[in-house]
Amino acid sequence: MREVETERFVAAPPATLRRLLTPAALVEYEGSFAARGTRTDGDATVVTVAGGGLEFDLRVVETDDGWRYEQVGERGPFDAMETTVTVTPANEGSRLRAVSRVSLGLPVPLADRVAGWKRRGELRRLLDNVAADV
């Protein structure tokens, strides 16, 4: 697995970001897939996403300081993907941080590096789009 992370200051308080960032909104802000629907599964929200000829589920759990989500099932673009997004107060705004672990599950050299590169781009888009929206 490859771990990638990115963070950004956002000029909005954590409470504003927590209201804005629903499980479906997290997907939409990443920009690669569209949220097709959500359903509750215990303490999680399962978001069905689609795009690029794929449709799969992400299981999103709200945490004390943000969200944790992972690809579930075998239909997604990665062999495995888990992401944590955290919001912490900072300088009259918030520090938004996204960390993702990703694997393509292929015996090809550099496969996970390519997956990490793609995932880092999605996380940067997430943070940039949130910052532009508040």
Image (cartoon, rainbow, N blue to C red):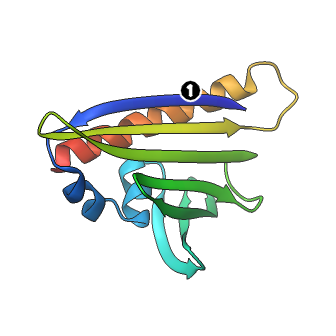
Q: Residue furthest top?
A: 109
Give left or right: position of 35 versus 16.
right
Question: Looking at numbered disc 1 in the image, what kind of residue is underneath it?
Answer: Trp
Write the residue at 56% across / 38% down: 100
Write the residue at 59% across / 64% down: 59
Question: Residue 21: in sight, yes or no?
Answer: yes
- Give the vertical position of 124 relative to 126 (above or below): above
Q: Which residue is mark 1?
A: 117
Give left or right: position of 42 versus 105.
left
Secondary structure type for disc 1: helix
The x and y percentages for residue 49 are 54, 64
Instruction: Classify 10 Å Cα crowding around label 1: few (below 14), some (14-19), many (20 and above).
Output: some
Give left or right: position of 99 versus 109.
left
- When asked about the image quadrant of residue 90, the answer is top left
The x and y percentages for residue 129 are 27, 44
Write the residue at 53% across / 63% down: 60
Near-viewer residue (61 or 117): 61
Give left or right: position of 104 versus 134.
right
Near-viewer residue (66 or 3): 66
The x and y percentages for residue 99 are 51, 37
- When asked about the image quadrant of residue 94, the answer is top left
- When asked about the image quadrant of residue 2, the answer is top right
Write the residue at 72% across / 46% down: 80
